[in-house]
Image (tube, grey):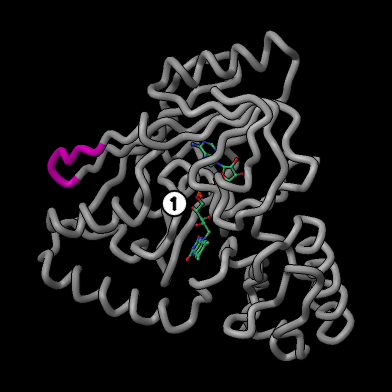
Amino acid sequence: MLENEPLAASTTYRIGGPARFLVTPADADDVAKALQLAQDRGLPWLAIGLGSNVLVKDGGFPGVVIRVGKGLDRFEMKGATAIVGAGVATPILARRTAEAGFAGVERFRGIPGTVGGGVYMNAGAHGAEFAEVLTEVTVMDAKGRVRQIARKQISFKYRSSNLGNVIVLEAKLALIEEPPAKLKEIQDKLLRWRKAGTPFDQPNCGSVFKNPGGTRTAGALIDECGLKGYTVGGAQVSTMHANYIVNTGNATASDVLKVIEHVRKTVAKKTGVELELEVKVIGV
Ligand SMILES: Cc1cc2nc3c(=O)[nH]c(=O)nc-3n(C[C@H](O)[C@H](O)[C@H](O)COP(=O)(O)OP(=O)(O)OC[C@H]3O[C@@H](n4cnc5c(N)ncnc54)[C@H](O)[C@@H]3O)c2cc1C
């Protein structure tokens, strides 16, 4: 547990002020202890994974941030069921299940978060999402109580769930047998496609806005409005992919939020579409 620890290093954006406490749990008991600390001190708490879908504000998070990672990284195959800790990185889940000859999450190879964040956000790619393969999730509530929730009790939407005020500890996924060579071929093809269209050389948080439905993606709408390259301070609408706002080196959260506001207003004015945020804005 670290005190007043900058969160920038815990996010793919490399942006964000300090957490009052940053806890890296070694197991589920540590998660419960972190929640107890928050309760004892009357502080808010927040779970994060690899911080690949968050924008932490410059004032940081005035509470306990629980970074779920290595300590919760169980990976087990029981027949076609994968039992996976929330701290397992999603690309590793995709690779290991494919190598074991099971399909269902192979298209998640390029999602740079954790299984916990992926389930909580209903992450997905190339037409597949966590909601389709999840059968059960193990969670801890704010009082440290652990329980299993069956898939049918959870409501998932595009990039969101109704899991609410809980920490995801583990997920059970139902997969289907498929030859490893075929799965590897799919993954290689999708990774090549991603590499060509993602600004991997600049810190970012993936897609900033949700696709609004209809025929045009958020990226296409932003591009149509001529916003590629729009810059405030160190934050810029990527010239490669208009739904990415990249950190060109020394961006603050305030810079990113200004770009977001400008993009939203311009797109609404020119196209009539109100873009909704996919990235989670955290802190003060
Ligand atoms: C280059 C790039 C490409 C991306 N491509 C995609 C893509 O194709 N598809 C896609 O869906 N996303 C994509 N993303 C976004 C991101 O990777 C996913 O949303 C990912 O699932 C987030 O996981 P995380 O562990 O990083 O979560 P974080 O960013 O740490 O957290 C995201 C949200 O989940 C909550 N959360 C995290 N872990 C837990 C937990 N254990 N229990 C409860 N709540 C938790 C957090 O509180 C927060 O609200 C991309 C991001 C980047 C940087």
Q: How many marks do you count on the picture? A: 1
Quarter of the image with the C terminus in it: top right
Residue at (67, 72) in percent of width and height? 212
Is disc 1 placed on a helix, strand or loop? helix
Is residue 159 depicted above or below 271 in this figure? above
Q: Residue 28 in magenta?
A: no
Question: Where does residue 56 sit, x and y in percent of width and height?
Answer: 70, 47
Front residue (pair 26, 163): 26
How would you classify the magenta stretch by its main secondary structure? strand
31 relative to 15, above or below = above
Query: Which quarter of the rendered picture does the N terminus lie within?
Result: top right
| Residue found 37% across the figure and 52% down from its top | 90
- Provide the residue designation for mark 1: 131
> Which residue is nearer to you in this view: 214 or 26?
26
Image x and y of residue 171, in percent: 36, 38
What is the span of residues highlighted in magenta in the rendered image?
A: 75-80
Q: Residue 65: which quarter of the image?
A: top right
